[in-house]
Image (tube, rainbow, N blue to C red):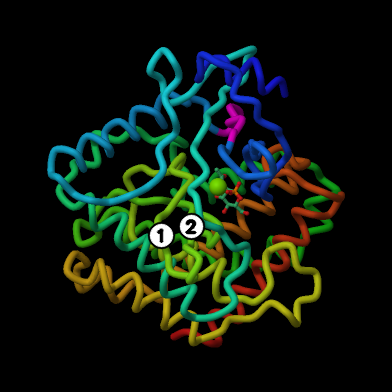
């Protein structure tokens, strides 16, 4: 990564920054740029196999920014810096890159360790969606078409069962059966996604805790990582918060005794989100809050298993059975969720 060459597209003088790998996302490559050991910028190489139209991301950012400016709504989130030619991203040597200022006195956390953090994060994601009330979401382009479309994910899974690695299909027999036995989750999603009682809103679609910045006191500052912001349903953002904050251990955990749902965190997420969104949700959307977790955890298990059967073409893996073990982990979480949340 020749960061000096990249920075030449942003600054007219040498910014003298050191570069190191940063974070643990599965999709993009992320780097921290520092000067005298002080963080200055985040540089990301966008995964263009996943985000096939990076222009859609930039267009959406322009639309969001314009809406807030026009309506004078004071919502803060870090936008990428514009290049010297005025673009939110830089296309160079077949790479798509973007540079974002590192927010001073902010930090992110990789796991949710008390219900206050869950509350603060949910408050931030609720605040984000609520701020765009009135924006016609048809203006936003899908940055990943059908990203949280469970009908489509179900189809991809079935395609994988037809065309994927036979020995892996056999190996995952038990998990495949379990997903089929719980197909009613797909059916309920289909009802919700076609019902006028469930609105399309500006939805983040990646509400894990490390996509929230916290200040020194531990209060939420803002949400980050806006690649997947597009039109969507409230069950997506709530669901991914449930999936990623309720268990003390992440999707990588192999010891399943550590993977379980903490009810107090569920309550905190709902309270934080509703603090900002209560006025906007329909009765049916509120009633579907517990379903959000089932929907998202099930979909993630389906996506991990689909990728396992397709020989790991999508998610980054660190060892051979990584995607399989993630699936087992998520199905275990789904069970615990169903026992704990009604
Ligand atoms: C991916 O890269 P990361 O960790 O932000 C994925 C999410 C999954 C998550 C599972 C664009 O997100 O949908 O929930 O992995 N993002 C994309 O860890 O596919
Ligand atoms: Mg992300």
Which image quarter holds the N terminus?
A: top right
Tell me the residue at 65%/38% (across/down).
Answer: 34
Confirm whether residue 270 shows in the render. Answer: yes
x and y, in percent, of residue 284 in the image: 24, 71
Q: Position of residue 211 (x, y in %)?
A: 51, 54
Quick one: quadrant of the C terminus?
bottom left
* Circle 1 Cα neighbour tier, 10 Å, few/some/many (<14 / 14–19 / ≥20): some
Q: Ligand 2 near label 2 (Cβ, under 8 Å)?
A: no
Question: Mark 2, residues whose alpha carbon is within 10 Å: few (<14), some, or many (≥20)?
Answer: many
Q: Position of residue 97 (x, y in %)?
A: 56, 26
> Residue visible at 42% across and 65% down?
220
What label does residue 191 carry, if any? none
Dividing the picture into quadrants, the one containing residue 19 is: top right
Residue 30 visible in the snapshot:
no
Please give the name of the residue rendered at 27% of the width and 51% of the height, measured from the top-left corner: 75
> How much space separates mark 2 and mark 1, taking CA atoms?
5 Å
Queried whether the magenta region covers residue 45, the answer comes back as yes
Query: Is 99 rendered above or below residue 251?
Result: above
Question: Residue visible at 61% across and 76% down?
Answer: 247
* Residue 317 is covered by the magenta coloring: no
Task: Indicate the quadrant where residue 159 lies.
Answer: top right
- Most foreground residue, 287 or 246: 246
User: Which residue in the structure is indicated by mark 2?
Assistant: 213
The image's mark for residue 221 is 1
Contact? badges 2 and 1 (CB < 8 Å): yes
Q: Is mark 1 within 8 Å of ligand 2?
A: no
- Residue 158 left/right relative to 192: right
Residue 52 position within the rendered picture, expressed as x and y whole percent measured from the top left: 52, 26
Nearer to the camera, 249 or 335: 249
Q: Specify start and end residues of the magenta stretch as a single range.
A: 43-50
**Disc 1 secondary structure class:** strand
Above-or-below relation of 218 to 59: below
């Amino acid at each position: 990564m020749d960061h000096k060459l990249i920075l030449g597209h942003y600054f007219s003088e040498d910014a003298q920054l050191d570069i190191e790998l940063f974070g643990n996302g599965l999709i993009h490559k992320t780097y921290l740029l520092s000067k005298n050991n002080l963080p200055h910028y985040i540089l990301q190489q966008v995964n263009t196999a996943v985000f096939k139209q990076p222009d859609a991301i930039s267009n959406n950012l322009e639309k969001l920014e314009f809406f807030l400016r026009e309506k004078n709504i004071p919502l803060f989130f870090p936008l990428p810096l514009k290049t010297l030619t005025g673009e939110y991203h830089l296309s160079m040597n077949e790479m798509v890159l973007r540079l974002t200022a590192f927010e001073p006195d902010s930090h992110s956390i990789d796991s949710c360790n008390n219900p206050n953090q869950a509350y603060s994060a949910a408050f931030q994601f609720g605040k984000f969606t609520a701020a765009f009330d009135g924006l016609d979401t048809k203006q936003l382009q899908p940055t990943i078409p059908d990203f949280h479309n469970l009908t489509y994910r179900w189809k991809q899974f079935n395609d994988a069962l037809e065309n994927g690695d036979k020995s892996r299909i056999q190996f995952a027999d038990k998990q495949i059966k379990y997903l089929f036995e719980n197909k009613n989750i797909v059916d309920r999603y289909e009802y919700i996604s076609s019902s006028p009682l469930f609105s399309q809103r500006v939805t983040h679609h990646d509400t894990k805790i490390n996509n929230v910045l916290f200040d020194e006191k531990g209060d939420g500052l803002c949400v980050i990582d806006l690649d997947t912001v597009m039109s969507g349903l409230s069950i997506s953002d709530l669901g991914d918060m449930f999936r990623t904050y309720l268990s003390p251990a992440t999707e990588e955990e192999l010891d399943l005794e550590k993977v379980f749902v903490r009810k107090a965190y569920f309550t905190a997420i709902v309270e934080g989100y509703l603090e900002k969104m209560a006025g906007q949700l329909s009765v049916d959307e509120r009633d579907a809050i517990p379903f959000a977790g089932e929907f998202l955890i099930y979909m993630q298990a389906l996506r991990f298993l689909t990728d396992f059967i397709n020989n790991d073409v999508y998610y980054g893996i660190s060892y051979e059975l990584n995607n399989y073990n993630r699936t087992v982990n998520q199905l275990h979480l789904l069970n615990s969720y169903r026992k704990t949340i009604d």
